[in-house]
Image (cartoon, grey):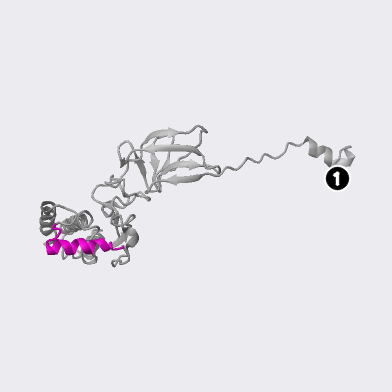
């Protein structure tokens, strides 16, 4: 206090002059410029100049980096953070190796995340896995379906979508047009060639026109439940391919058929414990 300082022959002003000012670092603000998946491509400062930028391949490997200011930009795809010591990307529930394009540990949710326990989305240009759990755009969890269609059906006219299916996915109005043109013979195959569609349809019939419903043990052996689980996933996958590749995402009726196959797979998954 002042009395104690006076006994020492000092004043507060003298003490203040001898103290080093508190260092307050200058705050810099940058805006992230990301691609359609949320991967940072550049950091732009207040003046609109690029202080950092990078280019990546499809699997998130850094091809080129411009970093004149030695900035630490560790964010990669949504849910990923670069680990400088290992070169891996921390992805919430596990680590992703961009050099291999796969995870280095198994999926903690097991088969509910897909058949391949180490797989990152097969189409990383379109899909992401922000939690390190779901290797497909549809994640099957605990007998129910968590639908995470991040970018819709891939159509260029998604802004015009209004209808939704039972899981909230937007229905592309162009798909009705493609379906009708296919049925009337104006445009057989939609966006696919007739031969391509015929092959996919034959695969769909082979996989989907079977008994796929599961029953709890002991009424049904676990091996049979697992077989039907795989069968439903394969059925849903080929339906999804037909919808997306040939008919702009599929009309509402065909989207619901795809949903039913995934839902049946999810029901089977819940019986495999």
* Residue 121 locus on image (x, y percent): 29, 47
- The residue furthest front is 186
* Visible residue check, residue 240: yes
- The residue furthest top is 68
Mark 1 closeness class: few <14, some 14–19, many ≥20 residues within 10 Å: few
Residue 80 is drawn in which quadrant? top left
Residue 239 is drawn in which quadrant? bottom left
Q: Inspect the magenta stretch and tell me whether residue 187 lies in it.
A: yes
Q: Residue at x 48, y 37 (%)?
A: 52
Name the residue tied to disc 1.
2
Q: Inspect the magenta stretch and tell me whether residue 236 lies in it.
A: no
Q: Is residue 272 above or below residue 129?
A: below
Image-based side of 219 in relation to 25, left or right: left
* Residue 91 locus on image (x, y percent): 39, 46
Residue 242 is drawn in which quadrant? bottom left
* Residue 62 locus on image (x, y percent): 38, 36
225 and 237: which is toward the camera: 237
What main secondary structure does the magenta stretch of the protein show? helix
* Residue 153 locus on image (x, y percent): 28, 56
Q: Residue at x 86, y 38 (%)?
A: 10
Q: Is residue 270 above or below residue 97?
A: below
Q: Quadrant of the C terminus?
A: bottom left
Q: Which residues are magenta?
A: 170-188
Q: Residue at x 32, y 43 (%)?
A: 105
Q: Under tag 1, what secondary structure?
A: helix
97 and 143: which is toward the camera: 97
Q: Is residue 133 above or below residue 216?
A: above
């Amino acid at each position: 206090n002042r009395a104690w300082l006076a006994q020492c022959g000092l004043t507060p002003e003298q003490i203040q002059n001898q103290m080093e000012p508190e260092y307050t670092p200058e705050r810099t603000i940058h805006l992230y410029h990301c691609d359609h998946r949320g991967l940072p491509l550049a950091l732009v400062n207040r003046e609109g100049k690029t202080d950092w930028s990078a280019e990546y391949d499809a699997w998130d490997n850094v091809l080129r980096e411009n970093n004149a200011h030695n900035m630490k930009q560790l964010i990669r795809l949504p849910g990923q953070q670069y680990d400088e010591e290992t070169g891996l990307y921390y992805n919430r529930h596990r680590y992703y190796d961009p050099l291999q394009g796969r995870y280095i540990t198994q999926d903690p949710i097991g088969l509910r995340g897909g058949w391949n326990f180490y797989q990152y989305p097969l189409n990383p240009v379109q899909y992401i896995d922000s939690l390190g759990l779901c290797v497909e755009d549809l994640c099957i969890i605990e007998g129910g379906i968590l639908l995470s269609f991040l970018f819709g059906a891939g159509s260029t006219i998604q802004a015009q979508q209004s209808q939704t299916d039972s899981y909230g996915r937007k229905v592309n109005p162009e798909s009705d047009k493609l379906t009708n043109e296919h049925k009337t013979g104006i445009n057989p195959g939609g966006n696919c060639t007739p031969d391509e569609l015929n092959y996919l349809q034959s695969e769909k019939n082979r996989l989907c026109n079977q008994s796929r419903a599961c029953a709890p043990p002991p009424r049904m052996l676990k091996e049979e439940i697992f077989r039907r689980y795989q069968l439903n996933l394969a059925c849903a996958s080929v339906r999804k391919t037909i919808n997306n590749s040939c008919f702009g995402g599929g009309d509402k009726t065909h989207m619901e058929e795809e949903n039913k196959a995934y839902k049946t797979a999810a029901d089977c998954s819940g019986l495999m414990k």
